[in-house]
Image (spheres, coloured by chain):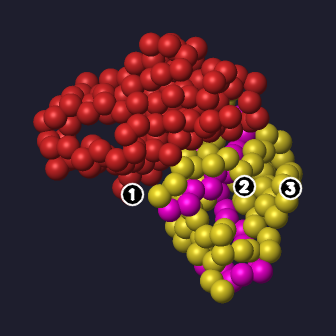
Chain colours: A yellow, B red
Amino acid sequence: GQSLEQPSEVTAVEGAIVQINCTYQTSGFYGLSWYQQHDGGAPTFLSYNALDGLEETGRFSSFLSRSDSYGYLLLQELQMKDSASYFCAVRDGGGATNKLIFGTGTLLAVQP
Amino acid sequence: DAGVIQSPRHEVTEMGQEVTLRCKPISGHDYLFWYRQTMMRGLELLIYFNNNVPIDDSGMPEDRFSAKMPNASFSTLKIQPSEPRDSAVYFCASRKLAGVGNEQFFGPGTRLTVL
């Protein structure tokens, strides 16, 4: 089957750094994405990794290792507004389809 | 630019009634997606369209669900008859063909409650 596994919850304090891991098992692979969703809101796109390595976008960075079927989202200088759910996602079946498979989601709680 | 627009934002109905959810994608986007989100099943794709043509409807749970996209600026998801287990948040999303990676733009969602 196809699955993306993430920790269900992570807690951290303001100003700290937190890493959210994602391991995937899919029939094809066409990049790993991360989405943020605040409670009651819409998922919003954060990042995309097509190749191995680290991609940085401001306080957020995302890493991919295709050989390990593994990636992570790194959030630095945590702020209260970062409290949200974070989902990794992989395009199913490689590049032939636009169907996204989403992970189970990680609820990040940032404490003062 | 306006984002993806969905209506209604909230819908409460009784079991057996027909429910129609509406979506207006971002102008110029080539793909439209319908998702359902529940605590038990997470965020799952129901169906997606490319240039108004349904491409993959393998996620549609059963024949009670149907989706249409009569033109590039409008899509509907219909549930008939509705059941309590259909209670969920339904999201519509869109993207451009040449968009960044797997970036999709989500609407605010419709929270459906079937009593």
Q: Amino acid at mark 3?
A: Glu
Residue B44 seen by the camera: no
Neighbor class of circle 2 (other Cα within 10 Å; few <14, some 14-19, many 20+) is many
Q: Chain of mark 1?
A: B
Q: Position of residue B85 (x, y in %)?
A: 24, 47
Within-10-Å neighbours for mark 1: few <14, some 14–19, many 20+: few
Q: Residue at x 51, y 36 (%)?
A: B5
Helix, strand or loop at disc 3?
strand
Residue at point 67%, 62% (across, down): A21
In the image, the segment drawn in magenta is A11-39
* Residue that badge 2 annotates: A71
Q: Nearer the viewer, mark 2 or mark 3?
A: 3
Identify the disc placed on residue A56: 3
Residue at the image position 44 percent from the left and 13 percent from the top: B70
What residue would you read off at disc 1? B39
Looking at the rendered structure, the kind of residue marked 2 is Gly
The percent coordinates of residue B54 (x first, y second) are: 47, 17
